[in-house]
């Protein structure tokens, strides 16, 4: 029997699921070995019997937790898709501000109509078996992850920095090109797509283990960036990780 697969979304743009659709167009053979029973972006049927669950989006409401825990109870494997589910993503930028201020800014006098709380990754709510990072995910990495799961092994993301991939592609370092980049502290795995096309890494794949944040800040200052500009760059995708490392609590 084919393993049954379901896709779920929480607070996100659903761009990672669209990347999955794109992946399946380039790798239709995957549909021969799995059965998708729930995928709102691509089908109307909703099967509740599944072994593998892919989750996109961050947890931003108390009511999300019950749904996420239900998925964990049902699924043999839970895999997060993209930066929002993996890191809290761009949604976690708001965690730097008092929650009531954010609610009022977004909803005005209707702020009490909508439940919300600080954004967090799925792993802050349940145990996650594997993660596919990025904003959006890389379609080759998704195909690899599915293949590994079918082989009975967990897909693993690199722990080395993006700079390794840049060197392998013989890219000229962004710093030597007069630009800035978070490649030294960001996980590899995207084939250095942004630097390859002339744009510095923004950290969407998350921090490497034991990143040297002081060193990257010094390098960015040397390139003329102010502390406020550095904080803005480092918190676009890394807010949740950075706050956790610095012991910052949300309100």
Image: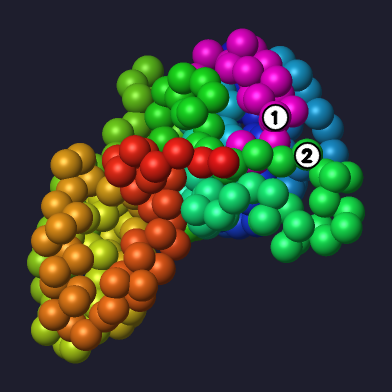
Q: Position of residue 28 (x, y in %)?
A: 56, 46
Q: Which residues are magenta?
A: 58-77
Q: Is residue 125 visible?
A: yes
List the residue tagged with mark 2.
Answer: 115
Q: Are marks 2 and 1 in contact (CB under 8 Å)?
A: yes
In front here: 37 or 161? 161
Please report the residue visible at 50 percent of the width from the left and 53 percent of the height from the top. 96
In the picture provided, is 8 more to the left or to the right than 141?
Answer: right
Q: Is residue 28 above or below residue 125?
A: below
Disc 2 crowd, CA 10 A, few/some/many (<14, 14-19, 20+): few
**Residue 115 picture quarter:** top right
List the residue tagged with mark 1.
Answer: 62
Q: Position of residue 99 (x, y in %)?
A: 64, 48
246 within the magenta span: no
In the picture provided, is 136 more to the left or to the right than 69?
Answer: left
What whole-number distance in Å separates the C-alpha atoms at marks 2 and 1?
A: 7 Å
67 within the magenta span: yes
Please report the residue visible at 40 percent of the width from the left and 29 percent of the height from the top. 130
Q: Position of residue 45 (x, y in %)?
A: 83, 32
Please report the residue visible at 81 percent of the width from the left and 58 percent of the height from the top. 107
């Amino acid at each position: 029997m084919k393993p049954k697969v379901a896709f779920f979304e929480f607070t996100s743009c659903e761009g990672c699921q669209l990347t999955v659709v794109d992946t399946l167009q380039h790798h239709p053979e995957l549909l021969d070995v799995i059965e998708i029973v729930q995928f709102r972006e691509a089908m109307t049927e909703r099967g509740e019997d599944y072994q593998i669950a892919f989750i996109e989006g961050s947890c931003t409401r108390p009511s999300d937790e019950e749904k996420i825990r239900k998925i964990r109870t049902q699924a043999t494997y839970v895999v997060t898709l993209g930066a929002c589910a993996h890191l809290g993503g761009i949604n976690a930028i708001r965690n730097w501000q008092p929650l009531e201020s954010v609610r009022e800014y977004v909803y005005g006098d209707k702020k009490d109509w909508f439940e919300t709380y600080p954004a967090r990754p799925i792993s802050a709510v349940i145990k996650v078996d594997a993660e596919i990072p990025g904003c959006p995910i890389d379609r080759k990495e998704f195909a690899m992850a599915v293949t590994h799961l079918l082989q009975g092994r967990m897909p693993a993301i690199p722990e080395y920095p993006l700079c390794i991939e840049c060197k392998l592609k013989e890219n000229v370092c962004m710093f030597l090109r007069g630009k800035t980049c978070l490649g030294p502290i960001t996980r590899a795995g995207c084939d250095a797509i942004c630097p390859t096309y002339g744009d510095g890494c923004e950290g969407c794949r998350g921090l490497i283990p034991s990143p040297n944040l002081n060193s990257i800040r010094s390098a960015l200052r040397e390139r003329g960036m102010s502390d406020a500009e550095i904080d803005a760059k480092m918190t676009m995708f890394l807010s949740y990780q950075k706050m956790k490392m610095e012991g910052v609590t949300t309100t």
